[in-house]
């Protein structure tokens, strides 16, 4: 079909969201994701669900092929599940490297040299992304990826180096995953540094606050974040009601499941 101005159409978001939650250990990433309606837990070894959360999943998966089989079952089998949670991307990355090495008959991801192994791994990552997109498109499922954050030194041209949180995966994978996600949310607490006079012109610094967890939705120098939903800069996540606090801002997300009286 020839493209002309008569073929213009308005673009709108119609698919359930694909979201990436990342943060340091103990920030409640898994608990938040498993509060989503109809959640199926894709557990990558050695990840574990919280002890107080009833997670419905396929058991511990230790091969890339098993992860793809799990996504395939959700695609082909009849079910009413609304959400798939992959925990975690940093646990999945070694499986993707192993799969890449098997396909190319390498002993490890570094064998081809000059970063070529990580470049080849992009193809396997894209397979995973395509599988998740198929679940959204054809099965109406929202997708949540989880990842651990680590603090690294970051340098900007003409500026002093500073610490920045980023996902604990290779930078090539991080680029692919953040581009594919509709929302990349950084989970952390809000901490304010207070200074008090210590005499003789000196000051003592201490941290205050940090009791409430927040989902940070827009990027800052200290962390990567983004969203396509016009979310607030930050959303508080009360314990036990974190998903309800987030879901009311998400277009196309499955409705929260009503709790029994």
Image: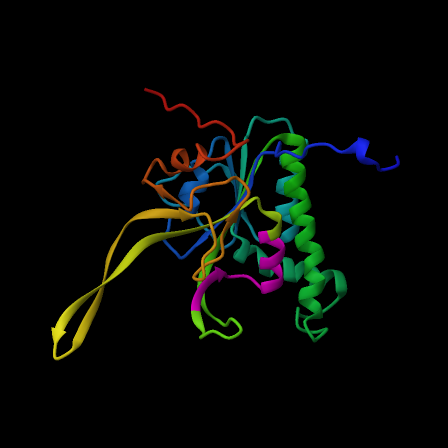
| Residue 127, percent from left and from top | 69, 49
Residue nearer the viewer, 34 or 51: 34
In the image, residue 147 sits, relative to residue 120, either above or below, namely above
In the image, residue 200 sits, relative to residue 167, either above or below, namely below
The magenta stretch spans residue 195: no
Residue at point 41% right, 36% down?
243
Residue nearer the viewer, 147 or 158: 158
**Quarter of the rendering occupied by the N terminus:** top right
Residue nearer the viewer, 233 or 79: 233
| Figure disc tally | 0
**Quarter of the rendering occupied by the C terminus:** top left
Res. 145 in view = no
In the image, residue 245 sits, relative to residue 108, either above or below, namely above
Say which quarter of the image contains residue 15: top right
Residue at the limit of the structure toward the top, as seen here: 261
Res. 209 in view = yes
Residue at point 44% right, 28% down?
256
Residue at the limit of the structure toward the right, as seen here: 2
Residue at point 40% right, 42% down?
31
Q: Is residue 228 left or right of residue 260?
A: right
Residue at the limit of the structure toward the front, as seen here: 5
| Residue 3, percent from left and from top | 84, 37
In the image, residue 108 sits, relative to residue 71, either above or below, namely below
The magenta stretch spans residue 165: yes
Q: Is residue 94 left or right of residue 119?
A: left
Residue nearer the viewer, 46 or 9: 9
Residue at point 18% right, 73% down?
203
Magenta span of residues: 163-178
């Amino acid at each position: 079909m020839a493209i002309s101005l008569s073929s213009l159409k308005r673009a709108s978001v119609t698919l359930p969201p694909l979201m990436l939650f990342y943060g340091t250990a103990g920030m409640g990433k898994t608990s938040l994701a498993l509060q989503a309606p109809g959640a199926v837990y894709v557990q990558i070894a050695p990840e574990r669900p919280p002890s107080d959360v009833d997670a419905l999943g396929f058991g511990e998966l230790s091969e890339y092929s098993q992860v793809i089989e799990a996504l395939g079952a959700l695609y082909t089998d009849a079910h009413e599940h609304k959400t798939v949670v992959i925990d975690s991307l940093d646990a999945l990355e070694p499986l993707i490297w192993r799969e890449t090495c098997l396909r190319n008959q390498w002993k490890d991801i570094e064998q081809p040299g000059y970063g070529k192994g990580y470049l080849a791994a992009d193809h396997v990552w894209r397979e995973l992304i395509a599988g998740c997109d198929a679940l959204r498109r054809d099965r109406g499922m929202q997708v949540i990826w989880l990842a651990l954050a680590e603090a690294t030194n970051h340098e900007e041209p003409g500026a002093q180096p500073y610490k920045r949180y980023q996902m604990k995966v290779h930078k090539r994978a991080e680029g692919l995953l953040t581009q594919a996600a509709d929302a990349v949310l950084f989970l952390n607490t809000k901490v304010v540094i207070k200074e008090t006079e210590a005499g003789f012109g000196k000051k003592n610094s201490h941290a205050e606050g940090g009791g409430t967890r927040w989902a940070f939705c827009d990027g800052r120098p200290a962390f990567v974040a983004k969203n396509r939903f016009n979310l607030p800069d930050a959303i508080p996540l009360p314990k036990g009601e974190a998903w309800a606090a987030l879901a009311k801002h998400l277009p196309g997300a499955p409705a929260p499941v009503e709790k029994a009286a």
